[in-house]
Amino acid sequence: MATTKIFPIRITEVASITYIADGEKTDNGRLIYTFGCDKNPIKARKDFAQIRSMGTGLSSVRSQHFIQNFPPCEIIPEQALKIGIELCDKFLKGEYQYYLAVHKDEHVHLHCIFNNANMFDGWTFKTQENQGNKQNRSWKKLMDLSDEIWIFGY
């Protein structure tokens, strides 16, 4: 079973994107996929900022970062990238820009940093997707989708 965790980024957005885009970890960028933003980390941060500037401005969170760790020796990086794209499509519903990178060091895992502001209405991810009881919290949705894709899709 793959494990997941999610946390907010308030200050270090460009540093975080630059870290996950590291060429040594991503096979010189071959294991990177973006949606609604540039592959260059600095340009991606600017793309995120442009969408945020049209939003509500009510959150100190710039973006969200989730990690999906796969069991050692059970997946190849190319499969992880496909799973990551599917997970992002289902979790973010085409409403948030994201920067996805698979790391092939030690064990295969992926990082996704996505804009906290929705591309269409400017509302924040926290406001729209992280409210209510435990079953409705974003970390629980991410975990359930990850399990569903891992168990039934691959």
Image: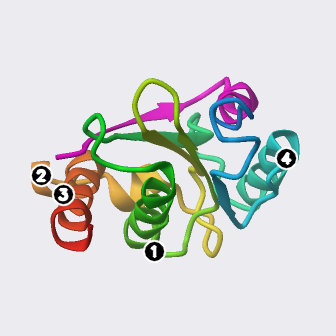
Left or right: 44 as drawn, with respect to 120: right
Mark sitting on residue 133: 2
In the picture of the structure, the residue carrying the numbered disc 1 is 93
**Mark 4: which amino acid?**
Asn
Could you say where residue 55 lies in the image, as x and y percent from the top left?
67, 59
Structural distance between the alpha carbons of marks 4 and 2? 37 Å
Q: Earlier in the sequence, mark 3 or mark 4?
A: 4
Left or right for 62, reference 125 = right
Q: Residues within 10 Å of mark 3 (few under 14, many from 20)?
A: some
The residue under label 3 is: 147
Q: Which residues are magenta?
A: 1-19
Depth check: give the residue in front, 26 or 122.
Answer: 26
Q: Could you tell me if the residues under marks 3 and 4 are in contact, i.e. CB atoms within 8 Å?
A: no
Of helix, strand and loop, which one carries label 2?
A: loop
Q: Residue at x 45, y 74 (%)?
A: 93
Q: CA distance from mark 1 to mark 4?
A: 23 Å
**Could you tell me which quadrant the C terminus lies in?**
bottom left
Mark nearer the viewer, 1 or 2:
1
Question: Which one is earlier in the sequence, the residue at label 4 or at label 2?
Answer: 4
Does the stretch in magenta take in 4? Answer: yes
Where does the image place residue 67, in percent across and percent down from the top left? 41, 39
Which residue is at 43% across, 54% downward?
A: 80
Residue 104 in the image, given as x and y percentages of width and height:
52, 36
- Image height of 141 relative to 5, above or below: below
Q: Kindly identify the amino acid type of the residue bearing the numbered disc 2.
A: Asn
The first of marks 3 and 1 along the sequence is 1
In the picture of the structure, the residue carrying the numbered disc 4 is 40
| Towards the viewer: 101 or 88 | 101
Camera-near label (4 vs 2) is 4
